[in-house]
């Protein structure tokens, strides 16, 4: 199926939406998209990289789609799943009322659970560790699911390690943290790279949004230092990302905009930007509530 070359719509993959077989943080639509990608779009010309797999929810659906892909014959170890595999107590709420509640403590290794969860598709999966020291093979990457840009050091490392291997006119890149307030550098990168990556789909009811690499990314882009992106460019970046996003994601992108100033220790400016968004968006259940708490810790 030629998917109108660059256009992906929910209609094409909605039928794959199901309840997750594996405990995970990505949404049902996001999992359906990942499965659809490896089932219908993936050609096998490059590898599949899953950055930040946690217990394997993203890896599982990527592997499930690949296992049924009719076009690709070599399916052996085509999915590279990276994670720290060190338990973070801040993630405890994701396992409440499950059989995994209270079994891990801060720093515990949970790789065994990842292996257990993804056992069915083990032949398709290569398990890797921390992107800061694991590196990458000298192989093209056809699909990059990016759920590990959690801090600036890792973000810079991901750019240098994986982006040079993306294939122009072929590779897709998903930023899972597109609608998250704690990773405001993701929006800066999306804007900085806009002439090279075409936005092809915003996955509804999820954090993720999808791009396709159109032409080779110059080396100086790969070495972008997100801390040096100035306010003029940042303002354009959040405006640009708000336009790309579906309505459900906009309040969280607005919250990331506020965080850009908060992280730069510009509290007045952060409060000013926040007050503009406060009147524009419904903040309930959005990251704007988290941001409000940071900006005004003494208010109820
Ligand atoms: C939000 S969770 C991922 C959720 C997962 N994709 C899912 O489908 O449920 C982010 C993950 O990124 C991982 N991570 C953070 N920094 C990393 C790094 N430097 N290298 C590899 N993984 C990293 C964490 O260990 C964590 O499991």
Image: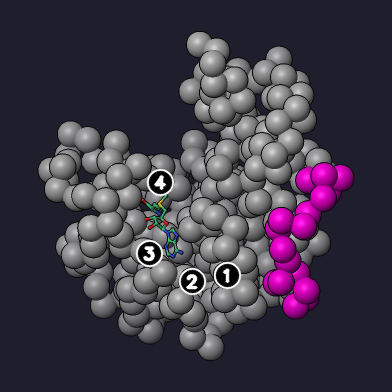
Residue underneath mark 4: 26
Circle 1 — which element?
A: helix
Residue 113 lies in the magenta stretch:
no
Mark 1 or mark 4, earlier in chain = 4
Q: CA distance from mark 1 to mark 2?
A: 6 Å
Magenta-drawn stretch, dominant element (helix, strand or loop)? helix
Please give the label number shown on residue 157: 1
Residue underneath mark 2: 132
**Residue drawn at the location 41% of the way across and 42% of the way down:** 27
Which callout, 1 or 4, points to the residue nearer the camera? 1
Residue 31: give x, y in percent of width and height: 40, 50
Image quarter of residue 55: bottom left
Ligand 1 lies under 8 Å from the Cβ of mark 3 = yes
Circle 3 — which element?
A: loop
**Residue drawn at the location 35% of the way across and 42% of the way down:** 90
Q: CA distance from mark 1 to mark 4?
A: 23 Å
Image quarter of residue 50: bottom left
Mark 1 or mark 3, earlier in chain = 3
Residue 16: give x, y in percent of width and height: 38, 48
Circle 4 — which element?
A: loop
Ligand 1 lies under 8 Å from the Cβ of mark 1 = yes
Which callout, 2 or 4, points to the residue nearer the camera? 2
Ligand 1 lies under 8 Å from the Cβ of mark 4 = yes
**Contact (Cβ within 8 Å) of mark 1 with mark 4:** no
């Amino acid at each position: 199926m030629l998917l109108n070359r660059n256009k992906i719509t929910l209609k094409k993959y909605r039928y794959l939406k199901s309840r997750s077989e594996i405990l995970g943080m990505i949404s049902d639509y996001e999992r359906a998209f990942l499965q659809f990608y490896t089932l219908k779009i993936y050609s096998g010309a490059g590898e599949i990289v899953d950055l930040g797999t946690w217990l394997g929810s993203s890896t599982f659906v990527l592997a499930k789609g690949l296992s049924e892909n009719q076009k690709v014959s070599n399916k052996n170890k085509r999915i590279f799943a990276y994670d720290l595999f060190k338990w973070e107590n801040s993630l405890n709420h994701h396992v409440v009322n499950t059989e995994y509640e209270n079994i891990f403590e801060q720093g515990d290794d949970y790789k065994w659970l990842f292996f257990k969860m993804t056992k069915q598709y083990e032949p398709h999966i290569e398990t890797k560790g921390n992107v800061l020291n694991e590196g990458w093979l000298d192989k093209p990457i056809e699909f990059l699911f990016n759920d590990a840009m959690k801090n600036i050091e890792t973000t810079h490392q991901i750019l240098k390690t994986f982006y040079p291997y993306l294939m122009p006119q072929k590779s897709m890149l998903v930023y899972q943290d597109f609608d998250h307030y704690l990773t405001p550098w993701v929006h800066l990168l999306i804007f900085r790279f806009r002439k090279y990556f075409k936005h092809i789909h915003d996955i509804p009811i999820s954090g993720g949004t999808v791009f396709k690499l159109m032409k080779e990314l110059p080396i100086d882009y790969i070495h972008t230092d997100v801390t040096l992106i100035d306010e003029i460019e940042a303002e354009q970046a959040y405006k640009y990302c708000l336009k790309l996003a579906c309505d459900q994601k906009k309040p969280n992108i607005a919250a990331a905009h506020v965080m850009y100033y908060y992280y730069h220790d510009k509290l007045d400016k952060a409060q000013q930007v926040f007050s503009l968004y406060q009147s524009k968006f419904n903040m309930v259940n959005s990251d704007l509530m988290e941001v409000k708490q940071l900006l005004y810790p003494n208010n109820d």
